[in-house]
Image: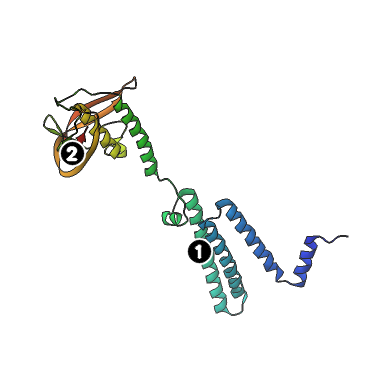
Amino acid sequence: MPITPLQVLNSARSAVPAVNYALGVAGIAAAGSIIILVSGNTKASIIVISLVFVGMLLLFAFSRLVSAGGRSTFVAGTVLLWAVLIFFITFLTFTATSFAFAWPKPWAQFLGIAFESSQDSKSIVHQGFANEALAMAERFSPPILSQLATSGRPKSFSPPKLKDRTIDGCIASPFFPEEEKAQCLNSAQELIASTFCRSNGFSKSTAYVVQTYGVIHPSFKLSFSKNSDGSAKYDWLRSDASGSIFDTISCI
């Protein structure tokens, strides 16, 4: 009758009881392999495997303390054992939540887990809306509000004004929802500046500067939306509550 590997292993365990600990090490190695398979060969997997091995050694030492004679030794072993268990439970919980929810953020960053925050997601969505709005703006020519001889020459307005009112640095547009604090994004200001240039007979804006002041300026706020046929719809609305205004707009 051939000898199976399992019989050899059982014989070795009977002859040398310490082989049981070798089986434990093999189990830990298998757990480490699973960790690497799931998380890859990253900093996180290396840290987890290392701590698992350290925990195995500590638990073995504490089990010896708990089984040792003497009440003080027993109490010390019990306290240390629970401390290690609580630490590892906390560690594994934080590691799992870092992968699932990117929380706690410092630990997730340390493990190299890159998550897109809700604010980043909103910025990406807003940028998509902004690109659509800018593309629409390039397809229409607003009525020229002032008679300027552009002759293809660049001009800098400092400060830019319409009918003696400054230009609000924020927009009123469904492309940049106010409830999400998107009305003053750079892309919104780019749209305002370019629309101002077209309103003065130029083709587009090449540069602009927006300043936030502690006082209120009577300004014009750009209202920009989309008609039912997909064309751009805009208007300059009077605003008496403008805190951010354009200091300079350069047109070409």
Residue 188 seen anywhere in this rendered image of the structure:
yes
Q: Residues within 10 Å of mark 1 (few under 14, many from 20)?
A: few
Q: Is 100 in front, or is 67?
A: 100
- Please identify the residue farthest to the bottom as the structure is shown: 70
Residue 195 at x, y percent in the picture: 24, 30
Q: CA distance from mark 2 to mark 1?
A: 58 Å
Mark 2 vs mark 1: in front: 2
Q: Earlier in the sequence, mark 2 or mark 1?
A: 1
- Secondary structure of residue under mark 2: strand
Q: Amino acid at mark 2?
A: Thr
Residue 79 position within the rendered picture, expressed as x and y whole percent measured from the top left: 52, 71
Q: Quadrant of residue 110?
A: bottom left
**Along the line of sight, the residue nearer the viewer: 18 or 220:** 220
Which quadrant is the C terminus positioned in? top left
Horizontal side of 78 relative to 206 (left or right) equals right
The amino acid type found where label 1 is placed reads Phe
| In-image side of 146 versus 57 (left or right) | left
How are the residues colored?
A: rainbow
> Element under label 1?
helix
Tell me the quarter of the picture where residue 172 sits. Answer: top left
Q: Which residue is painted at 46% across and 49% down in the image?
A: 101
Q: Where residue 203 appears, x then y in whole percent?
A: 24, 28
The residue under label 2 is: 248
